[in-house]
Image (cartoon, rainbow, N blue to C red):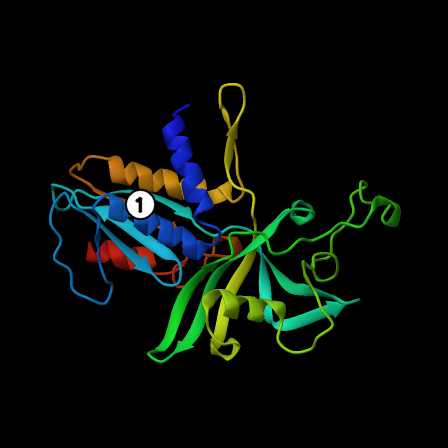
Amino acid sequence: MNNLAIKNLCTYIDAAPSPYHAIDASCAMLDSAKAIRLDEHNSWKLEPNTLYYIARKPAGLIAFRTGSEPGSGFLLAGAHNDVPALKIRLEKKMIQRGMERLAVEVYGGPILATWLDRPLAVAGIVMLKTDQGITERLFNSVKPVAIIPNLAIHLNRDVNKGFEYLPHQTLLPLVAETEKDGDSWVTRYLARELECKETDILASDLMLYDADRAFIFGPDDEFLSSPRIDNLEGCHAILEALCTAHAVKQKQVAVLFNAEEIGSRTREGADSLFLRDILERI
């Protein structure tokens, strides 16, 4: 196993707890490879055998290397950067027996039982009101801030017999001890971490993620264990291949789509015009 390549993959996955962070990490990879960033809204003048990329908000990316012979076609590879998750409902506060819990919505197709009894962190984007207008901020708590506790087995004897976890009843992350009314813990926490007023937080797209980091194990380091490996390993492999490849006569294209877990019908999803429009311009 190429340990350097696998360590780079682990670093990429750890840096990408949300689709927005995945695009940020992907742009960093491309910048390191001296790729030129393009703006969809501007006209382009492309040079042969040159690496370019376009990031479409909120979380899509297309990178390409022009070829040496016009009209020679495309070599294309794609992946998706979103993963199954529990998304936080910022507007809803839940207090049960002096404990504050988060209201969540299931995103995609997670294995629900794997979310219990493990450290959960929070990541995503937050829209803030500033003196310059509305700005978008990436957010990653890094450290665990929540947990979804299982009941003790003597309170749930069927837990090992195929117990069904109902998201709005049994998947409510525990975050704080409180009896207070008012804004939710998430709003207060975001305001503190982002150094802003609670009233400046206009909207957010936040998700819980497994705070455990990717790691290599086995007597010969032959195994890799990581959260979000589907499909971030695909994203990293495609970008790594593009960044290290030599120019050929065809145009080489790497595309990272968002929203595969929910049908791909966002403006940067596989069912959008994103790829078609960029290929036409190339």
The residue nearer to you, when weighing 111 against 252, is 111
Residue drawn at point x = 31 percent, y = 51 percent: 27
100 shown above or below 227: below
Camera-side residue: 202 or 265? Answer: 202
Q: Residue at x 84, y 44 (%)?
A: 153
Image quadrant containing the N terminus = top left
Q: Is residue 125 left or right of residue 98?
A: left
Q: Camera-side residue: 15 or 164?
A: 15
Q: Is residue 248 visible?
A: yes
Image position, residue 85 (x, y; %): 57, 54
User: Where in the figure is residue 51, as x and y percent of width and height?
Assistant: 20, 46
Position of 7 compared to 42: left or right? right
Image x and y of residue 54, in percent: 27, 56
Label 1 crowd bin: few (<14), some (14–19), many (20+), radius 10 Å: some
Q: Position of residue 218 (x, y in %)?
A: 54, 23
Whether residue 253 is situated above or below residue 41 in the rendered picture: above
Q: Residue furthest top?
A: 219
**Towards the viewer: 85 or 202:** 202
Q: Is residue 31 above or below residue 58?
A: above
The part of the image, by quadrant, that contains residue 244 is: top left
Amino acid type of the residue tagged 1 in the rendering: Met
Whether residue 109 is visible here, answered yes or no, is no
Query: Above or below — where is 4 with respect to 281?
Result: above
| Residue bearing mark 1 | 29
- How many numbered discs, if any? 1
Does 103 sit left or right of 213 as displayed? right
Kind of element beneath mark 1: helix
Q: Quadrant of the C terminus?
A: bottom left
